[in-house]
Image: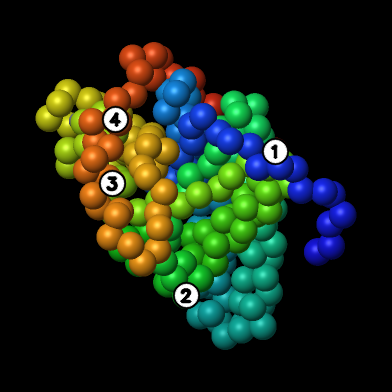
Amino acid sequence: MSVTVPENAMIKPVAYLGVDRDTTGHIAVVGNPVTGKILKLGKRAEHVHKKYRNMRKILQKSGKYRKVKRTRKREGNIEKIINHKVSKRIVQEAKHTGMGIKLEHLKGIRKARPGRNFRYSLNSWSFYQLEQMIEYKARLLGIPVVYVDPHNTSRECSRCGLIGNRSGKSFKCRCGHVDHADANASFNIALRPVFEEGTDRLHADRDACKGNTDIPKEATLRTIATLEPPML
Ligand SMILES: [Zn+2]
């Protein structure tokens, strides 16, 4: 890709949007900790994935390996289109709100096969692709993209920092906080300190900022917006 658009000067964001990619049914769930707004993006991808997986099972049984290959390619193309739309929407949201973007630092996402840790088994290449697209689109607008430690982002309470009770799509904490599990995770990501490789600062920082993780009351009055790629 060759792009001649000049890179804007980096914006100094007041806060960050948290992007959770390991969600219970969407490509990404985006949380704005300032307004409490949640965006759930790319739901259809799961259906696409299921459809092609079933198709491949049937083709494999009847020994049609060349067709199996072709379905992989087709699925990859569709995933790419979805990732383009999702990344575009995330970057747009950051631009409109004047915020930066925080993602989890997922180690080895290119190699790792989706196992138990990925509740939604999109292949890790797709996570990586989305990450690259967000970085690229954000850079053109001067929006910073930073990474945080992924440890317990889906288990910690975004209000008080304790480990809460997560079951399926719901999250409950002893402090009384109840939330959609993916929304809670995206707020945790948004509020975490930036990951710095090779330092021990991470955990100390996380504990130090726990007192700081309060989400404003307005956060409970949140808007839920969903983006479905219209052409799929
Ligand atoms: Zn709590």
Q: CA distance from mark 1 to mark 4?
A: 39 Å
Q: Residue at x 52, y 59 (%)?
A: 127
- Bin the neighbour count of mark 4 within 10 Å (Cα to Cα): few under 14, some 14-19, many 20 and up: some
Q: Amino acid at mark 4?
A: Asn
Q: Earlier in the sequence, mark 4 or mark 2?
A: 2
Residue 200 coordinates in the image, percent (x, y): 28, 60
Q: Is residue 204 above or below residue 35?
A: below
Disc 3 element: helix
Residue hosting label 1: 230
Residue 219 coordinates in the image, percent (x, y): 38, 19
Name the residue nearer the viewer: 12 or 224: 12
- Bin the neighbour count of mark 2 within 10 Å (Cα to Cα): few under 14, some 14-19, many 20 and up: few
The quarter holding residue 11 reads: top right
Residue hosting label 3: 205
Disc 4 element: helix
Q: Earlier in the sequence, mark 4 or mark 3?
A: 3
Ligand 1 contact, mark 1 (Cβ < 8 Å): no
Q: Is residue 159 above or below residue 219?
A: below
User: Is 165 on the left or on the right of 115, as rendered?
Assistant: left
Residue hosting label 4: 212
Q: Nearer the viewer, mark 1 or mark 4?
A: 4
Q: Nearer the viewer, mark 2 or mark 1?
A: 2
Q: Are the residues tagged 4 and 2 within 8 Å (C-beta)?
A: no
Disc 1 element: loop
Task: Note whether residue 170 is visible.
Answer: no
User: Is 4 on the left or on the right of 184, as rendered?
Assistant: right
Q: Which mark is residue 111?
A: 2
- Bin the neighbour count of mark 3 within 10 Å (Cα to Cα): few under 14, some 14-19, many 20 and up: some
Give the color scheme: rainbow, by chain, secondary structure or one colour.
Answer: rainbow
Q: Amino acid at mark 2?
A: Lys
- Bin the neighbour count of mark 1 within 10 Å (Cα to Cα): few under 14, some 14-19, many 20 and up: few
